[in-house]
Amino acid sequence: MQLFICPRDWTFSRNRFTPTHLVSLQNPKADVSDLRPPWIPEENHHVSYFYDVDLHDHHLAPTREDIESLVGWLLPRCQAGTENRLIVHCDAGLGRSTATGYIAAAINLGPGREDEAFQHMVDSALERRLMPNSVIIRHADAILDRNGALIKPLKEWNRRVNWRRTFQ
C-alpha cells in the first residue's frame, strides 16, 4: 500500500503517485463538492466529518462512532498485500490525516508492527510538524483491539517533538 498524507489543497496531487483511493477528513458541514479528483471513483472516496479536537473529554472531539465508520472503510482497503494507493487529507495535513494514515499503515502491517506503521505515516506525510490526533488513535486502538500498542508510538513521538499539543 502506498500512502500520501497531505493538506486539503494537495488532494489533486500526483506528486508521489496517482492515487486509487482518497480519505477526506472534514469539519461538519464543510463544502466537499470539490474534494475528489476525477481519476478516483466515487466508491473509492470516503469522507468523515468531525473536528480535529484532541481533548478526550471535549464535546466536539471525534466520537468512537466516527472512528468506527472510518476504520470500517479502511479495513478492507488497507489489508496486507494491497496495491491500493491512498491519499489521506484533512485541512492542514497535521492532525486528523496523520492519525488516519497511521491507522491505515497499522492495518496494512498488522499487529505488533505499530512502531513501523507510525514511521511509515511520518515518511508518507507532506508536512513535517505532525500532530497526530490522540483521540482518533485511542479510539482506533480500542476498535482494532491493539491494547495500547497504537498509543505507545504516539506518546514517544509527543515526548520527542517540541511542537506537540498533547501529552496523551
Image: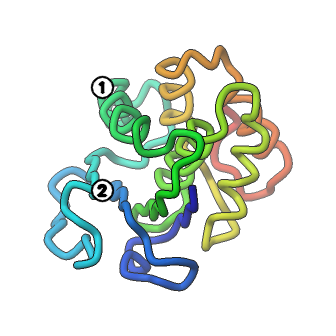
Q: Of the residues under marks 2 and 1, which one precedes in the sequence?
A: 2
Who is closer to the viewer here, 4 or 136?
4
Pick whichever, 2 or 95, lies toward us. 2
Amino acid residing under circle 1: Glu
- Colouring used for the render: rainbow
Disc 2 crowd, CA 10 A, few/some/many (<14, 14-19, 20+): many
Q: Quadrant of the C terminus?
A: top right
Where disc 2 sits, the SS reads strand
- 153 sits left or right of 37 in the view: right
Q: Dot 1 corresponds to which residue?
A: 65
- The one nearer the camera, 88 or 127, is 88
Q: Residue at x 30, y 45 (%)?
A: 50
**Amino acid type assigned to the residue bearing label 2 in the image:** Gln
Where is residue 17 shown, x and y percent of the image?
52, 77
Which residue matches tag 2?
26
Q: How many marks?
A: 2
Q: Is residue 61 above or below residue 124?
A: above
